[in-house]
Every structure is written in structure tokens, then in C-alpha cells.
Image (tube, coloured by chain):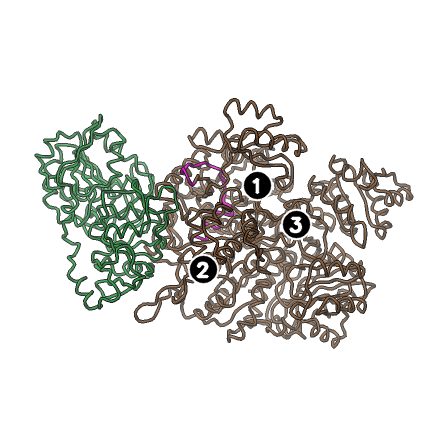
Amino acid sequence: MRDGYLLLEDGARFDGELCGHLGEITGEVVFNTAMTGYQESVTDPSYAGQIIIFTYPLIGNYGVSAEAMESDRIHARGVVMRDPKNREDVATAEGGWLDWLADCGVPGIGGIDTRALVRHIRDRGTMRGGIFPADLAEAEARERVASEPSMDGADLARTVTPPEPIRFEGDGPHVVGIDTGVKLNIVRELRERGCRLTLLPCTSSAEQVLAEEPDVVFLANGPGDPGALDYVVDTVRELVGVRPLFGICLGHQLLCRAVGLETFKLPFGHRGANHPVKELARGRIEITSQNHGFAVQGPGGEPRLDGDEPVRWETDFGVAELSHLNLYDRTVEGLVLRDVAGATVQYHPEAGPGPHDARHLFDSFLDMAHA
Amino acid sequence: MPKRTDLEKILLIGSGPIVIGQAAEFDYSGVQACKVLLEEGYEVVLVNSNPATIMTDPEFATSTYIEPLLPGPVTKIIEKERPDALLPTLGGQTALNLAMALHEDGTLERFGVELIGADHAAIRRAEDREEFRRTMTEAGLRIPWSLTVGSLGEVEAALAENRITLPAIVRPAFTMGGQGGGVGKTETELRQVVSEGLAASPINQVLVEESVLGWGEFELEVMRDHNDNVVIICSIENVDPMGVHTGDSVTVAPAQTLTDRLYQELRDQAIAVIRAVGVETGGSNVQFAVDPDSGEIAVIEMNPRVSRSSALASKATGFPIAKMAAKLAVGYALEEIPNDITRATPASFEPTIDYVVTKIPRFAFEKFPGAEGRLSTHMQSVGEVMAIGRTFRESFAKAMRSRELDSPAEPPTDDEELLAAIEVPCAERFDLVLEAFRRGLGVETVHKRCLVDRWFLHELQTLATKGDGTDGLARTYKSVDTCAAEFEAATPYYYSAHERPRPDGTVASEVRRGERDSVVILGAGPNRIGQGIEFDYCCVHAAMTTRELGRDAVMVNCNPETVSTDYDTSDRLYFEPLTAEDVLAVCEQERPEGVIVQFGGQTPLKLARALEEAGVPLLGTPVDAIDLAEDRGRFGALLRRLGIKHPPYGTALSAEEATVIAEKVGFPLLVRPSYVLGGRAMEICYSTADLNTYLKAHVKADQEHPLLLDRFLENAIEIDVDALADGEDVHVAGIMQHVEEAGVHSGDSACVIPPMSIGEEMLEEIRATTTQIALELGVIGLINIQYGIAGGELYVIEANPRASRTVPFVSKATGAPLAKIAARLMLGEKLAELDLPEPPAGHVSVKEAVLPFARFAGVDSVLGPEMKSTGEVMGIAADFPTAFAKAQAAAGVLLPTKGTVFITVTDTDKPAATQLATRFHDLGFELIATGGTAQSISSMGVPVTRINKVGEGSPHVVDLIRERRCDLVINTPTGSGARADGQAIRTAAVRHAIPCVTTMTGATAAVRAIAAQQQGDAAVLSLQEIHAPTRAEQPR
């Protein structure tokens, strides 16, 4: 057992034992409150550049398996846990969690008082930090944390987007995605519905997107600050009103920015599998999978909305109407464009990990292709 | 949609007495519901037969009825109160069944009472096996197949039609303890097991069902509102795989071994189940079996109501399911209800937790010699503990020590025998598993025997070999907050954790407290026979009073079934084991004004000395007084000094000495080990031979374990007294006369207030003696004294300077809340300052014990000095016979009003039995008796049919009962002899559900009750009506 510590940019230090890859790493430190789905989370490209604290203490209970991959690799930079496990007892396990972290070169740290750490971040906001071996002097570690670039303004999509288009055949509508780091479960959901799917590098131009002759354009989830992705926003702006669009998570933020709405950074983000989201049209509540650090402002620039009304924004492309609201902190979780074809949600209807309550959204997104 | 305004008055049904399978969790859920409904402005009509519940305290309902939970009395209540709605989902199976009966007999329709929460169709879909199967199949869900067959031919047909998959389980109908059942792994084997099963079943019927033995067992707690929003509150994984009732299984929350994929599948299915069954609003529990190899899921069952599991889930997550269920039932939607704990977020979410919860059941097989002790699909545990830890190991170790076992498990020394023992699910299974790992046996070796998931076994192996992982870490307290710290918690619900100190050497505790002094109240730990809900009741009252008196009430307890562990009950709740170390750590954190150890039964009393030695201030009666009362020598001297009589006694430190002392004290003798709870291993010996048998069979007697021998006062009237004292004055709050004669444990005996056959002079002597003893002991708070009256003389049998199990009963009977008053005295108030209400005149209250014999195959149902009851009920009426009849009915003893009485008694009881027989004859009953008894009866000119004893050949008495040719059995086993036949008679009576009275005094009361019942159904009266004149004068 090799001792190590987590150091935050405000100087707070939490000691533990290194696990997984016994190295050091810096990044933005965020917490996830889901009790299952650790492998799906670390392979979700949206976690690029981040160190994940899992609030559930026992992580690794059921090992790792190919079917739980949300991309081809681990995107999280590091993992912070209370009581990490390396078991592979369940039938579906193909390997141990900690062995796999080690094989993938991803540092972890266990034995951390994660609850105290989460309370610290909850009260002071998301910040940078790093995992370091105990023998590295704290002053040295502090410098390394300080030299980690801030997530504000970080274009991480470019680091996770595919270099070449990826094509999946299908008999259904042609969905063309701007791939800022799509999760495989979104791909699975679309393919299950028979879609033909083309994922383009996020640097693609509107002409390149339209050249694919999409029935509907999909804006993917992904890491980093939506404010740093002006080039994607510009592309999207050229597509609004031309083709129906739907966006998930980062894609939601990008579409909103493309029609002229503003985003802001949440104090500590939404990461977990238990956030209640109200679908205003039917008054139904869905328990959702969430992973985002930024959100879209309300019509008056407000971060939180008071009522459960489908409030409206005047956008560059007509009216946008609130469709989904987070009941935890009353932030925007989704909207529809009323004058052009477009709809977006901030959360993850594809689950993986998390509840399946919102999977039906894929059907309504695809309805736009037929409209 | 906000709450419904078309409802004004709502009827709520409780769950009745504590029985195995239905315990204090329904007081917890009922209290939450009552509070919610009153807060929302509804009138609440509550009916429950169990006086030892907080919900039956008059302030929790508009009208409170302590009446039998049977259609007759409840119909009378409905007729009188005319409620608009009945909420049936918060009082366990009892309330659900009763609501269904009231629906089916047309009562609800007749009086226009709406079922809210779940309607009868939904209840039927969940409860009726066939309807449930159809509903699940239609919803596309898989449930294990099962067939009821009456012949081998039917099995052949099913095999031919591929309706059977192997292995299959065979369960014969109506045999006890699974006798004659088995597993068919091949077709040949199946045919054989079915043949055997058909032969073993008295009705030649067996249930053949799909085997899911060894599959993982999971439960999801689901809530739904009228907008069809559904959330999962908690997942629970049973550490024991399928085959052991979930109430008897060690369980953990959340599920540990499920991948996200599999968990989400269970979640989808649980939601599909609640929608398909159609529970409109409220909580349900859905149980699944999951094949660990294939991940295949089967739905096992669903409870369309709050349950033991939902109480556990509430305590495990901080999400109050029952409270929410009550709000949903009156029309609120989940999103309209704030989450109590965060206050900032709504209840329409799924709790996420950042700790591990372990629940371990508590058994009482030692109380029932002859019980097999093998766990199976019918529940046998009497209580449970829950523990919270940051790791599985810490949580599990905490739960293990919370059990507070009387004696540690004794694993076989031979490894093979140890493994063989692990193979059979039993109370000590996990003690044995840990022992196996300590001996170096491997995970695979153990897994093969018990099929417990390897994940748990690996953790347990680490626990056994390396400890619980807290070494080198510092103790701190963390909060249960439903959200893994994502939001700030407003509710102070804490558990201890061990964490690495921060660089400055500290570990921040989450405990927030203001400037007010705190009073720590130690709870009673797991329910067990001898220490049940009555003590939790007292602890809750202590917390209420502490708060009223301007202090912070701090509760320490580890029993998830209780009201005391509701975070609403106290200002701070510490969910912790009741060991000296854990309690001292809480005191270290709290620095309380004082600790109350008087209310939680023996559990906190055992800690009193250690607390005092650590310098923790104790409130109320000093520790030494407790010791003084328990030490026979010291207490005997005190009584002699006061000139108070007590039966002769002696203390033996060896078996030889016991024989010598026995001669000196004289037979009959009451023999027991010192410091016991609920009369463990207590017996009456009539001769040296009896004593020798006892010494051989039960008990070691040595320096460490002295044996107490008391002269047993045969045929004495037993009296129980609860009194309050403040050091200067004594208030005798309740004098109870036992219905059964001395020799039956007071906890198992029916008793009556006011006493029925004691003269005023004797009552005065009892009051005076009680006052003398309480003052001499220096009691501040409560004292319970047991007396025997023999030959017109008053004897003190024992005194306990603490809350007794009769406190709730006396409080309900007299209208004086004893525990609350006692708490005031302990906090410095004086009796002279308190206006104590006068007991109501014109009402008789009877308490009756409820016994679990039907749960334990082959166990003798005779009453004796060892306590065996799990719970109690109360009957209130204008006269004793009616009150007694109500109490009997409430206890499930359905006394017949016509038919045949079978009487067989010992020689000494024969004169009384003939009297009794005459009375039964006059009431129109036929009589059957064995030889001697029959002769005595017919000599009085009463017609009686003589029947053979077992030894005299068939048809004999047991045949009589088996064929249900009698409606009531009176069988007295006291005195020597008459035991062997007696046991066969009583066991048969229990098996065939024929009421069986085992004492003459009990029989005399029964005949009077029957006479009263023949006059028609008794009137129903609410506590508020009974205590109306005195309520206004309750202490401030």
C-alpha cells in the first residue's frame, strides 16, 4: 500500500492510499453521487480533464466488463474513493476495477474521507486538484495543481472527438452527429431505433454536415466549457432552421448558444443518477442521469426558474420554450424551439449509468426527422 | 394537485399486537401517518388493540379505539364515527386483511367509506397468488412457476407438457416445518419427492414450484403518486440467498453486487410491478430473485403497503416512506412535498447514500426448547438491529455487536462439523462463517456450503482476519441525509464513522448542536422476548418530555423498527449499538446534562455502571439502587429491616449447594439463574428429582453464575404494581391483578386494572409497602414491584426500579402518562407539583399476552415462569368479563359461544374443573373429558362424554383435536405429572388453531367472557371518551 493524498487548489489536503495506476495526476475535482455505474462514468468522454470523487464508498464491487464501456477508453483523469474494491466475483466481470485502472494508467486514491471532501467542494465549489504520492512535497504538489489549466474556457471536445467520420448503417432516418465526445449508450439507443448514424468530428463545418444529407442533426454530450466551443456554435447556427436538431448535455448547451442563449457555470455541477426533472408538458417527473458543470440561463438571465411554467425565450430563431426543469435546483434541463425544429435536454436520457425513465425522448427526437 | 378537501375524517387501522413478522415498525409507520393527517387538518380515527404503541397515545388521533382488529368491532367504530375514508396500507398485513374483509362484507360500501392508498382490486392483485401471477405475466414479467398437485398423475401430466423445469421444490401442504418436502433435481427424483410429500400431507396435496434456491434476493422500495410518478427509495440485498425469509435474512442497503445495468433492470421491473398491480399512491415493496450466473430476474412478490422493509429503508436512507405514503394518500404529489432532510429539495427524487447499512435479525430459539432453529421461508425472528458504517465491514461488525446476544455462538470445534452447520441457515450462521474464516477456511469452501455471494464472503473473510478496518482511524459522526452530502442536511440523524484524521490531526464531526443542555436517552436495542416495544414506548415518552422541558433530547438506539429511531422523535438521533464503548463515545460528543437508563429495559441498565465509572451523570434512581434491588442478599435484608414478607429463598454457587438449599427453602421452588431477562431458564421444581433434572438440563451454577432458588407460592394471586417516586413522595399509579396464578411469567399473564378480587385493606397494604420500598431504594422515576398474595398475606416477589413492560398499559388504563411523569421527576420536578389525573371510574382494562407458538413446530404451548409472549393487547369495557373477552379476541383467541369444551386437568384442579364444567353446561356447551375429570364432572350430575387419554388408544384426545371435534380446550399442566399427554394436547390445539387455556384461573375468566359474549357484541369506546374528565388535568 502506497500512501498518497489529494490536494485541492485551496490547500485542503485529504490523505489516503494510492491505487490503480500508482502515479500522480491533476484536473478539475468533481463528485458523482450515483451508487452504481463507476465504469460507465470513467469512460464517459464528458469526464475528460476531471478527477471523479465517488460519494458511494465501495467502488469496484462488480468489476469491469466490455458491455459497460461508454467509449473506447477511460476519460476521467483520476478517481477518488473511500473503499475501493478489486473484486470480480459477479458473472459479468471480465476484470478487477483497480487492475483495470492500473492497466489504463489511471491513478486512483482510496481511504479518503470522501464525505468530508464532498462537503468541502459543495460549500466552496468545484476546483482544481490532484492526486499525489505521499513522498511528493505538498509545496511541489500545490504548484502542479496551480499549473493545471482552468476548466473555464477549456476546449476539451477537440481531445475526444473522432479524427474521421464514423458510420453506422441502418434503415431508419439518417442521424448526423457532431461528435464532441458521444457516449456509446446514445449510439446504442439510436441504433436500436434503426437509425443510420454518422458521427462527424466536432470541427466539421455546416457544409460538411449538410453534405451528409441528415434527416436530423444530433449534438452530442462532451467535456469542457461550452463557452470555448465557438467554432461548433457557429456550425450549429448555420444548421438551425435548415435541419431539425436535437442536443444532449453539452449538445444542449451548444444549441442554446447557437440560438443566442447564455450558459453559466454551476457551483458544483450535477453528477449522479437521482436528479428529478419535470417534463412540463405532461407534468411527469423523471429520475435522470446527470453529468454537467454548466447550465443555460433563464429568459431573464436568471440561473434558476421560480415557477413550473413553460417560460419562453426570444431567440435569434424565434421562440424557445422551457420543456424540462430540474426540481433540485430549478435550473433549465431542456427546451424546444417553437419556430424551427429543435429540442434539447441537459441530462442523459440514454442513461448508462442511471435510470431509464427518459429513454422515450429518443423517440420524440426522431419524430422530428419525420415531421 | 394539493390535498383532498372532500375528506374530513380518516380511519387508520394499526397492526395489533407485536407478533413474529409484524412488529414495532407499524407503530413507527402509523405514528407518522397519524401526525401527517392531523397536521393536514383531518380528523383521525385510529383503531389498534396494542396499548404499547405510541400511535394509541390519545394525542395522535382525534378518536383512539383500543379494540380487537376484527370486522365486528371495527364495523361498530365505523358506524359510530362515520369516517370518509379508510387508509389500509400503514398497519401491516393485519390492516390490509381487515380492510379487505370490510370491503368484502359490504361494510365500507354501506357506510360510504372510501379505501385510499390502495383499493381492493389492487390489494387483490398483489395478495392473491393467482391474480398476482396473471398480473405479472400480462405485464411481461417473469415469476417462478408453481403447481398445486394432488396426485403423481398430475405431475406426470405437467412433465409431459413441459410445465415443469428442474430442479423443482416440493412442499407438502399443512405440514409443519417443511416436513416431507424436498428438491427434485431429476424427473425420477421429483416423482419420489412428490410421492413422499403427498404421503406426508394430511390433505394429500403438495406445491411444486420452480427452484430459485441460491439465487440472489433483492428488494426495491417503490413509491408512486397519483400523477403516476414512481421513485425507488432504496435497494436492499439479502446476504442470505433465496430460501430464507427476508425478515430472517441478514440484509444490506444499498445492493452491493449489482452492476448498474442489472440494477436499472430491477428498477424498471419494480416500476412495472407497482403500475401493473395498480397501487395508486404510497409505498410498496417488490422482491426479486436474480440468478447470479445468468442475471435472469424473477419477481417473487410485492407488498402493496408499507412493510418491515420500508421501515428499514426509511431508517437506512432518511426518507420517511410512511409519512410520504400518508401525504400521497390524501392527494399530494411527490413534487409538492418537501424532502424533510434537505428542506430545499422535493420528495420526488431517489435517495442516494454514502454508507452501508446492515440489518441483522434477532432470534429467540433458546426460549422454545424443541424448536428446530432452521431458517426457512416463514419468518421466525423476533427483532432486528441495523447499523450504519462507511464500509461494509464496519457496518457489519457494528450490526453484529448491536445484537446484544445473551451468550456467544458456540461453533463446533471440528472444521467439517462447522461447515455442515454453515450449510443449514440458522440464527448464528454468520458467527459460524466468521469463525470458519478465522480458522483459515477459504471463500470457495464456505461458498459451496452456503451459496452466500462471494463478494460478501471475501469481505467477511477480511473482517474475520483483519478486523473491521477502523484501526488507525479516528471516530467521528456523519449524517444520514438522503443525498450523499450534495445538499446541506437540516435533520440531525447521525452514525459513527472512522476516518483518517486531516493533516491537523482532527476529524470534523457533522454533529451540530446549540447551547441547550442535552439529555441522552438510551434505547432498548433489538426487540426480543422479554424486552419489546413497551420499552421503546417509554424512551419515546422520555424524549418528548425532555424536549418539553427545554432540553435537547438525544436518542441512542440500533433498532430500525421503532418510533425512537424516527429522526422526528428526538433533537439528535445517534443510530448506534448500545455497548459501553459506543455509548460513551456519544456522551463524549454530547457532554450531556445526564443520561436516562431507566426506560430501555435491561439493555441500558447493564451499561449504567460503566457510564457512572466513566463520570457520565445518570438521571433518576442511582445505580446502586438498581444493584440493591437485584442483589437478593441486599434486597432481602432491606425487606427484613422494613418488616416486609418475602418467600424464603437461597442462592447457590454450585449444583450440590442448590440441592442443600432447596431442602432448606422448601418445595415447590422457583429456580433461575441470576440477572436474567424475561425469565430465561426459569422453572418451577416440585421435588428434588425435578431440581436435578433442571440442573442437568439447563444451567451451570458457579461463582460467576449464581443460581437463585425461591419458594414458589402455589395458587397465590399475583399482583404487579407500577409506581412513581421522586425521593420524597410515592404515587402508586397502577395495581394490576394477574388473571393467571403465580408461576406464569408476569409478561405472559393476563392482568386487570382495577384488581378484581382484592379487598381495600389489602390494596392499602400494597400501596403502603410499595411506598416504603420505593423510598428505601431511593427511586427517582419508576419502580415496578411484583407481589404474591397467599393465605391472606402479602409477599414481595421482586422489585425493579425502572420502567416495566406494563407502563404503557397502566398509562392507557389510568390516563396518566407514567413514563412522561417519570421523566419529569428524573429531571428534577416533584410529584407534589404535578397534577396527577384520577383513574377513570367505571372501566375495566385487561391486558393479555400474545404468544408465538404457532410459529415454532412442536413446541409446548404451556405457560410457565419463562416469558414466551412477543406482544400484548388490551381490552377495555365496563365490566371484567367483557374486557377479558375483548382482550382474548384481540389476542386472536376466538372463544366459542357455543359448541364443545374438552376438559382435562390435574387432580388438584378437579374440584374447580367440575364447577367450571357446570358453568359451561349452563351456557349450552357440550362437554368432553378424560377419565378422572369426566368422573368428577358426571358425579355433579353434568352430562359429559368420556374420551381416551393417548395411552388408552384411539380414538383419543389428540384425535379429537385433530378432527376439530371440540371448540375449546382446557388443560392444566401445573403440579407434577400430566405433562406428556398435556404437551401432545396443547401442540395439537396450536396446530389446529383451537383455543387452549392452560390455567384454571384463565379458564374461569374465559367462561365468564363467553357468557358476556353470548350477550352480543360489546360497545366501543374511545380513549378520549374514557379519559375525558381527567385529560384536562394532565401534567402541564
Q: Is residue B135 left or right of residue A321?
A: right
Q: State which chain is coloured brown.
A: B
From this view, report whether residue B565 is shown above or below residue B67: below
Q: Earlier in the sequence, mark 3 or mark 2?
A: 2
Secondary-structure class at tag 2:
helix
Q: Is residue B303 magenta?
A: yes
Q: Position of residue A1 (x, y in %)?
A: 32, 61
The magenta segment is: B292-316
Q: Which residue is mark 3?
A: B850
Which numbered mark, 1 or 3, is in the foreground of this view?
A: 3
Can you see residue B1006?
A: yes
Q: Amino acid at mark 3?
A: Val
Looking at numbered disc 2 in the image, what kind of residue is underneath it? Thr
Quick check: is B625 in the magenta stretch?
Answer: no
Residue in front for this viewpoint, B635 or A286: B635
Question: What type is the residue that disc 1 sits on?
Answer: Arg
Above or below for A198 versus A234: above
The residue indicated by pointer 2 is: B465
Q: Secondary structure at mark 1?
A: loop
Within-10-Å neighbours for mark 2: few <14, some 14–19, many 20+: some
In the image, residue B501 lies at what x, y percent?
34, 67
Which chain is painted in green? Answer: A
Protein chain holding label 1: B
Q: Position of residue A62 (x, y in %)?
A: 36, 47
